[in-house]
Image: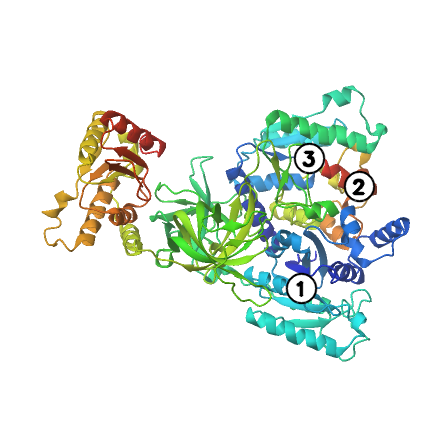
Amino acid sequence: METAKEHFQIVFVGHVDHGKSTLLGRLYADTDSLPVGHLDKVRDICARQGKVFEYAFLFDAFLEEQEQGITIDTARTFFSWGERQYIIIDAPGHKEFLKNMISGAARAEAAVLIIDAGEGIQEQSKRHGYLLSLLGIRQVVVVVNKMDLVGYSEEAFRAIEKEYRAFLAQLRLEPQYFIPASARNGDNVAATSTAMPWYRGHTLLESLAHFVKLPARTDLPLRIPVQDIYKFDPRRIIAGRVEAGTFSVGDTLVFSPSNKTAVVKSIEAFNVPNVIHSVPAGRSAGFTLDEQIFVERGEVASHKDAAPEVSDRFRANIFWMGKNPVLTGGRYLLRIATTEVEMEVEAILGIIDASTLGRGESPQRIEKNDVAEVIIRTRRPIALDRYADIDTTGRFVIIEGYDIQGGGIVMEVFKDEQEPFRAEARRRDFEWRRGEIHLDERVQRNGHYPGIVLFTGEKGSGKARLARHLERRLFNGGKQVYLLDGKNLQYGLGTDLSGSDKEEMVRRFGEVAQILLRAGQIVVSTTNTFALADHQIIRALVHPHTVITVHMSFVEGALPDNTDLHFLESDDLKAAAKTIMELMEEKNILL
Amino acid sequence: MKHLEELEDKSVYILREAYKNFDNLCMLWSIGKDSTVLLWLMRKAFFGHAPIPLVHIDTSYKIKEMIEYRDRLARDWDLTLVVGQNKEALEAGMAPERGRMECCTALKTRGLQQVLDEKRYNGVIVGVRSDEEGTRAKERYFSPRDKNNDWDFRDQPPELWDQFKTRFEPGTHVRIHPLLDWTEINIWEYIKKEDIPVIPLYFDRGEGLRYRSLGCAPCTTPIRSTAKTVDEIITELRSTKVAERSGRAQDADRGMEKLRKDGYM
């Protein structure tokens, strides 16, 4: 039996009318890759409809396409040549169909760009080059088509080659070959042209064989975005695709952003001949852990020494395909690997002009088909990488309404003021020596999860009164609860600190709180000592435990960021405590 | 066999995404080789389990062996089987003699629609492959269908980097296509690699005939072939240039384009 062939995906892109469909039709016809009778069938249809036969018709599956003369959607066709099975993705060139081109090109390993020798380089040709570079496609062949229309002139070809090469060089894209061709006449498609003796390079067909398979991402740091957790049988299997790196049984994995750690106990699979010891990048895997830690979809497993970044703010290049323009402050859903999170466009830094690759000045909005540089803020910190470091965890899509309307790549991950504390928490969590009792067991006995309620507000606004009342209510209800006042730390844990070491005091408070949370306690915190920024530090240190922030004031007014509940000094104590407890239920602290 | 691993990984990824994101999911099982490979991939994705119900549309014109094979696998693999049938149309005498398009529309498209309406599935996993015929090459992995079950192939949402359409308007549903990248040969290579039990109708049993594509008895004809094993089928397919569905009557005269636009799988 013949051995199975390697698969290779190539996208064909080009400006509308530059002859992409004709080139594809010719490639298939000349390599005898069409089903028996197909060529005759299409010739018959043309004869019936009184049309002149064109190779382009071979792939137009829908009547609409033939009538409009443009390819509407990304179609995939297959053809075998040499040692390979090629999957050809036919991406439309019409401007309106950017989303189809993106859908097609995003899954390709290489691209063939088509330029009309007569029309030369159009804005579209540049935009296509730019998008290919944005999508991470590095292997490109450029076909200068319709050479018959310029008398097979070498000068015409060289001029286009020179100009387009210079443009692509700015994108750090270097085409493997520039091929002068005439798809209609079959020059340099599958057969070497006799009309262009000055060209001694490859035909298109030959050039395809020179594309190489992309190296697997095995050498990169490990990334397994958790896809789901299965409990179909006694095994608790964590399922996810290895997006980069390799993992083995016995490896210690850390999960970001929760900072949980555990050791891989087994790698699971159905109908495999041998026990699996390790899994490389690219494979959809499943594994069990030595401990029943709580991890969920969206977290990214990695090795301890090369974990992904965790942040809620980053700079990105995005392309927008939605009808509604993107405005500063616009809110969407962001999906990166298996994470889904609410996001906001904090700033639009510029629209990138695909023709000049320049950045426009302080634009107000991003229109459909624009490529832009933006700052994105997510509602909670997520695990991510710079696209340049690890592509699969450094690219994302933006969802508006029910559909994906944009995509982008992470250029720079910002570190906010809390970053040193977040980093501290991660280091501490990675190295934490756990006792015999797991949090799950504590939750089961206590009948609730741990969580922290932070009170903020002016002095005398009734914070302490409400906090004490809440502590009493929870305790009487059988909950494990402790009221932690920042002041109590001053004379013991903070005895070496002066008043100016406030940040260090806050850090120590956060560390104490996180120990109480690990012990399964509900922590109620009220203090006048800490300001709003301090609460952000506490949040970073107690992550991923649930935090509820309650603000109190004398009169109605603007609320600090991240406030969950607001009460007035004059509000009824019991009703306020009840509202807080309802939120604790909603946030899954109380069950 | 690296490419088979790649295909399997992608399909498994898609199945797990579907299972996570759709609360009322089903998988269409025609009993043919493709949807049986799909069923096998579900067991791969879920570590030997088949948590998604399988819907079979029984036109009553299926080849008898197909039904026996279906029931045996359902029992052996602990499958949840949902059988749909357009009884009204059958009672009213619907048959291929009334016209193939009419029959397919009534017994398959309408039959499926009835099950989807009754069970309110919002995700339907289907084993179509893009190399089967032109219209299927235009499908996305996650392809929306509107309230009337129509497919607007001109305005499909973008799909990239394995981020799929998992949000949809109430009343609409999404067709999920984990086998889109597979070819007919890949299916057979995988059947061989995994040793998947396929229905014997695909093999020549001494008469020099075998089915290459399975459908209803009156509208599907066997092809001339002496392939008796999976290996022989693979060898045969490597040398043929006759379209796989050449034995399927419904494909003639743009039949599939019209059928699929109206919700045929």
Residue B184 spot, x, y in % from top left: 70, 48
Q: Residues within 10 Å of mark 1 (few under 14, many from 20)?
A: many
Q: Quick check: B115 left or right of A294?
A: right
Q: Circle 2 is placed at which residue position?
A: B251
Q: Secondary structure at mark 1?
A: strand
Q: Secondary structure at mark 3?
A: loop
Tell me the kind of residue under disc 1. Val
Residue A321, above or below B58: below
Q: Secondary structure at mark 2?
A: helix
Quadrant location, the N terminus of chain B: bottom right
Do the residues at pointers 1 and 2 share their chain? Answer: no
Residue B11 spot, x, y in % from top left: 58, 46
Q: Nearer the viewer, mark 1 or mark 3?
A: 1
Tell me the kind of residue under disc 2. Asp
Q: Nearer the viewer, mark 1 or mark 2?
A: 1
Q: Name the chain under label 3.
A: B
CA distance separating discs 1 and 2: 32 Å
For residue A307, what is the image quadrant?
A: bottom left
| Residues under numbered marks 2 and 3 in contact, where contact means CB atoms less than 8 Å apart | no
| Residues under numbered marks 1 and 2 in contact, where contact means CB atoms less than 8 Å apart | no
Residue occupying the point 30% across, 43% down: A560
Q: Circle 1 is placed at which residue position?
A: A112
CA distance separating discs 1 and 3: 38 Å
Q: Residues within 10 Å of mark 3 (few under 14, many from 20)?
A: many
Q: Circle 3 is placed at which residue position?
A: B30
For residue B93, what is the image quadrant?
A: top right
Tell me the kind of residue under disc 3. Ser
